[in-house]
Every structure is written in C-alpha cells, then in structure tokens.
C-alpha cells in the first residue's frame, strides 16, 4: 500500500511542478504549486516526518499559497498571461534546464548507486515526531529557543 501511495504522490508532485512552469495563467500556476506542496506533504508522511508534513501544509499551503491565490484572484492576471517573448530568453532557459538536468543526473547516478545496498540511517523509534521535537525544545534547546523568541520580539518592535 505504501508503494501505491508513494507513486501516486510522486506523480502528483511531478505533475504539480510541471504545471507551475507549463501554464500561462498565473492563477493555474499557483494552484499547481498548491497541489505540488500537498503531494510533498504526503511524501513527508511516508517518511514518517509528521512535523515537517504538518508544517508544510500549515505554513506553505495554508498561509503562503492561499495568500498567493487571493492576490492573483484579486489583481487578476487572466488577461495577462506570463509568456517569454524574447528568443534569447527561451534559448537561455533551455540551456540552463539542460545543464541542470545533466548536473542532477551525474549527482544522482554518482552517489545513489553506492547506496542501493545500504539500509539507511539508524534512528530510534519516534525520531522527529512532534512530541520529541517539543520535548527537545523544552529541555535541551530551551535557552536558544527563548533567545530566538526575544530576538523576534525586538525585531518586531523595531519595524
């Protein structure tokens, strides 16, 4: 069952990422990004990173992307599609994309083939769940956590 969910979420994440750059309407670009971020949250859940998945949904999908959707809907943008009209910009974009594809292919093939037979990192049960993160914030990292809150408070007072 995990493999099915992984492939569905992976395909949805790729489709959302492609939709972000494929559509010419900014509203559909933002909606594709929302779908992509939801799919990434599902992939984080499969990795048993519940806190990161919840933060992904709450912060990015719930706040930032909804803000983008409302801004695009309020300003408009349906009449003004985003299209690159310059030939040099298109050529530069294609060259950059191919260079990035080659770089990522070399990095993946060069590093992943040696790791295929390994079992991964040894982590204890419950690592990275919200309870453990909260416990670390209130015990081991209490002083840095409180210092960060004071810094944020004083920065907020300045601006």
Image (cartoon, helix red, strand yellow):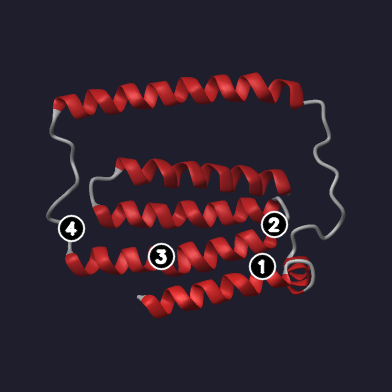
User: Which class describes the residues within 10 Å of circle 2: few (<14), some (14-19), or many (20+)?
Assistant: some
Residue depth check, mark 1 versus mark 3: number of the one nearer the observer: 1
The residue at 68%/62% (across/down) is 50
The one of 73 and 114 positioned closer to us in this rendering: 114
Quadrant assignment for the C terminus: bottom left
The residue at 53%/68% (across/down) is 58
Query: Which mark is on residue 64?
Result: 3
The residue at 52%/57% (across/down) is 38
Kind of element beneath mark 1: helix
Judging by the rendered image, the residue that carries numbered circle 1 is: 144
Kind of element beneath mark 2: loop
Residue 141 is left or right of residue 68, and the answer is right
Residue 36: image x %, image y %? 47, 51
Mark 2 vs mark 4: which is more N-terminal?
A: 2
The residue at 61%/60% (across/down) is 53
Question: What separation in Å lies between label 2 and label 4 (alpha carbons)?
Answer: 37 Å
Question: What separation in Å lies between label 1 and label 3 (alpha carbons)?
Answer: 27 Å
Mark 4 vs mark 1: which is more N-terminal?
A: 4
Query: Which mark is on residue 49?
Result: 2
Kind of element beneath mark 3: helix
């Amino acid at each position: 069952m995990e493999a099915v969910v992984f492939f569905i979420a992976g395909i949805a994440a790729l489709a959302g990422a492609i939709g972000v750059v494929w559509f010419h309407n900014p509203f559909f670009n933002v909606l594709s990004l929302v779908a992509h971020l939801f799919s990434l949250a599902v992939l984080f859940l499969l990795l048993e990173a519940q806190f990161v998945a919840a933060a992904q949904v709450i912060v990015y999908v719930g706040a930032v992307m909804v803000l983008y959707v409302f801004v695009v809907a309020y300003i408009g943008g349906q009449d003004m599609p985003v299209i690159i009209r310059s030939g040099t910009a298109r050529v530069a974009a294609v060259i950059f994309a191919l260079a990035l594809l080659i770089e990522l292919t070399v990095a993946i093939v060069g590093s992943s083939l040696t790791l295929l037979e390994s079992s991964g990192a040894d982590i204890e049960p419950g690592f990275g769940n919200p309870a453990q993160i909260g416990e670390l914030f209130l015990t081991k990292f209490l002083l840095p956590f409180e210092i960060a809150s004071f810094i944020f408070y004083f920065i907020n007072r300045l601006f």
